[in-house]
Image (tube, rainbow, N blue to C red):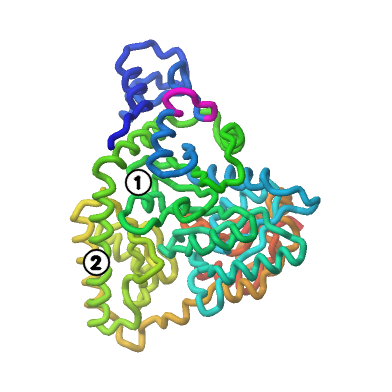
Amino acid sequence: MSVDTPIVDFVRGYAQSGTSRLHMPGHKGQSLLGFEPLDLTEIRGADELYEPEGIIAQSEANATRLFGTQHTYYSTEGSSQCIRAMLCLALQAAPRTGKRPVLLAARNAHKALLYAAALLDFDIRWLWPAAENAGALCSCPISAQMLTTALQELTGQGSTPFGVYVTSPDYLGGMQDIRALSAVCDTFGMPLLVDNAHGAYLRFLPGEPLHPIALGAAMCCDSAHKTLPVVTGGAYLHLGENAPVQEEAAVRGALALFGSTSPSYLILQSLDACNRQLTESYPAGLQRCCARLAALRGELNAAAQAAGCPVPLALDGPGREPLKLTLDAAALGMTGTALADALRGGQLECEYADPRYVVLMFTPCNPPQDYARLRIVLRQCLHSLPAAGGLLQPEELAGEFVALAQQARAHCTIRQAVFAPQERIPAQQALGRICAMPTVSCPPAIPIAVSGEEITPAALELMQRYGVTEVSVLRR
């Protein structure tokens, strides 16, 4: 099945028409960087993103069929816009209780969630990982039983959440059991909202369904640009059959609330063109890429074991997304940042590196030389292993959420903290101060201290480990 590309066709036709451009943008289609002839605004015939009746509506209908959703909406401002709109809709649908709205969320959430809480003025109750499963800052595995217990406690206290929010896949490639978590949410009558920014491609793999909407999520966001052939900023807001709001005008209103009135037609064309790719060669390419990465993980772990590494080099096993290659630098006696530098020396740039892990994101668009370069660098690292006594001990880098959970204490709401007078100070001077804006960089953009929380010794230790040198705090 192939699909049409109405946005691409319109823009190319306009660019070739010779029409005098007496409208925005200011470059008037004259090539400075090369893309300008295809860069338009919402002129007649180009439709309007938040009130589409023509080519954008047709293109979104194609995406809706491809993803198997109730409705798929385009975003030209990434998943951040979709996250805010998704939470806005869940709030609109929640029963009015006269109490402050509360969201139950896994703690490894992107800071976009905090921005949404500040703008929409709701509180967050955090789901922390069990101590035995607590690892790096990016991972927060939540079981159905943990979610059930948390919801029972909150509802028993009269604080019924307006939704449950999880990140899956996470930055290290871990995936939540969305089907099981969806079933729990259904039992309690609340929507499961998923930050699926890294998992747009999951819909197009063979076998058992892996995309959150297919597994029962009410709504999710996908960053198309992360794993599909889409330019930066292209994203989707997906509604499932149990989304609490289905009215199109309400959804577009929520997206418009957090979006520019000048959406990028370069991004819209990219989303439109991607639809055709998803009906042609891209799914087969995804399958080949995932198989190649599975074989590479096995190869790397066999080599690491033969070299006497204390842990596997490549994270593997059930519950992991197939398109990420996450390397455990502790296997090589290195930090993740040192391994990332070694990769750069071999002309390889990673997606993310932290004190322990390096994340490499592959797609079908990576040429064979990328795999060859990676093998060369990692082979060199394995041949240069330090003496056994010098190896990093993996347990020294584990359990980062445990102390945070024990010490976390909120002094004001997220909204109050974000909009209060604030100042940036050196992190080492921040003990006991109240966090204002989250100051962790992107990636991974997971706040070590949440807005409104006291900055604790555990938070300071993590800031030092992750290279956070300045902190935004409430002004005294």
Name the residue nearer the viewer: 259 or 45. Answer: 45
Task: Find residue 296 and name its label.
Answer: 2
Q: Residue drawn 52% across and 56% down?
A: 445
Which image quarter is the N terminus in?
A: top left
In the current view of this chain or complex, which residue is farthest to the bottom? 389
Residue 216 spot, x, y in % from top left? 50, 54
Q: Work out whether 468 lies above or below 245.
A: below
Q: Residue 458 or 172: which is nearer the viewer? A: 172
Dot 2 or dot 1: first in sequence order is 1
Where is the C terminus found, in terms of image quarters? bottom right
Q: CA distance from mark 2 to mark 1?
A: 21 Å
Q: Which residue is label 1 attached to?
A: 228
**Image spot of residue 219 (x, y percent):** 53, 48
- Give the SS element for disc 2: helix
Query: Identity of the amino acid at label 2?
Result: Leu
Q: Residues within 10 Å of mark 1 (few under 14, many from 20)?
A: many
Looking at the image, which is closer to me, 193 or 46? 193
Q: Is residue 148 above or below residue 330?
A: above
Residue at image coords 63%, 64%: 126
Main SS type for the magenta part? Answer: loop
Tag 1, which secondary structure? Answer: loop
Residue 311, percent across and down? 35, 80
What residue is at 61 percent from the left and 68 percent from the top?
Answer: 148
77 left or right, relative to 384: right
Query: How far from the left and from the top, in percent, is residue 248?
Result: 56, 34
Q: What residue is shown at x 34% (from left), y 50% (from top)?
A: 204
Q: Residue furthest front?
A: 187
Outermost residue to the right:
98
Q: Residue type at mark 1: give it.
A: Leu
The answer to whether residue 446 is left or right of residue 34 is: right
Q: Which residues are magenta?
A: 50-57
Residue 367 left/right relative to 101: left
